[in-house]
Amino acid sequence: MKTTRAIELQRQTAETNIELSLALDGSGTSKIATGIGFFDHLLTSLSKHARWDLHLSCAGDLEVDDHHSVEDCGLALGMALDRVLGERRGIARFAHAYAPLDEALVRTVIDLSGRGGAWVELPMQRESIGALSCENVPHFFRSLASAARLTLHLDLIRGENAHHIAEAAFKSFALAIRGATALDATAGMPSTKGTL
């Protein structure tokens, strides 16, 4: 990896074993293997549009269901993001983005505040998309926001097709996190408190 804003991380529990490498200032290359095809597609889209170089493998207890794998991938990715940002000096901190996919339109607003919190509204009319439970799409973002210590507002403005909604959510988040983590030479510590 060509950047100093990069990390390798392993997270292992009784339910999942995750290995990942993340470079924030990449070109959007990815190698994703979670055992959940549509989730792999969504993470690949996140990597591409955030311009992250992301390699992530997850061996999870899919014989139970997809919940633990999706949740733990969110936690591991959030932990990696938190660690690679360090004290968060010299970054833009705030960003927002909209992403459409056909009839679906999703908005993401991010503050790399140092405080984890997520308000996610992504109503979908299906129970699952392939092997990915629709309820786990917002759960992924809540898990990531908690571990990354970021404030996230992510909501569906309009849309009907669950595939389009989920993919627009990941693209919108990707664009916003790319903006929030952008280096800003004038930012210093982007907080009046002097710390994040």
Image: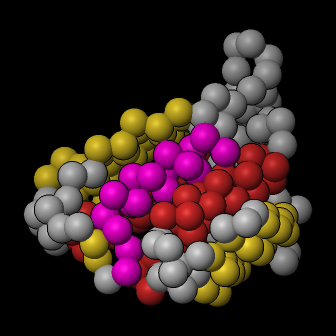
Q: Which residue is at 45% across, 52% downward?
A: 139
Query: Magenta region, mostly helix, strand or loop?
Result: helix
| Quadrant of the drawing holding the N terminus | bottom right
Does any portion of residue 99 appear in the rendered image? yes
Residue 30 in picture, x, y percent from top left: 63, 83
Residue at the spot 27% in from the left edge and 51% down from the top edge: 122
Against 75, residue 56 (above or below) is below
What segment carries the magenta color?
131-148
Is residue 169 toward the left or the right of residue 104 in the image? right
Determine which quarter of the picture holds residue 57.
bottom right
> Measured from the top left, where is residue 146 in percent x and y?
60, 41
Q: Taking 81 as reference, is 194 above or below it?
A: above
State the image quarter where residue 149 is shown: top right
Name the foreground residue: 138 vs 97: 138
Q: Is residue 42 left or right of residue 115?
A: left
Q: Position of residue 128 (x, y in %)?
A: 28, 72
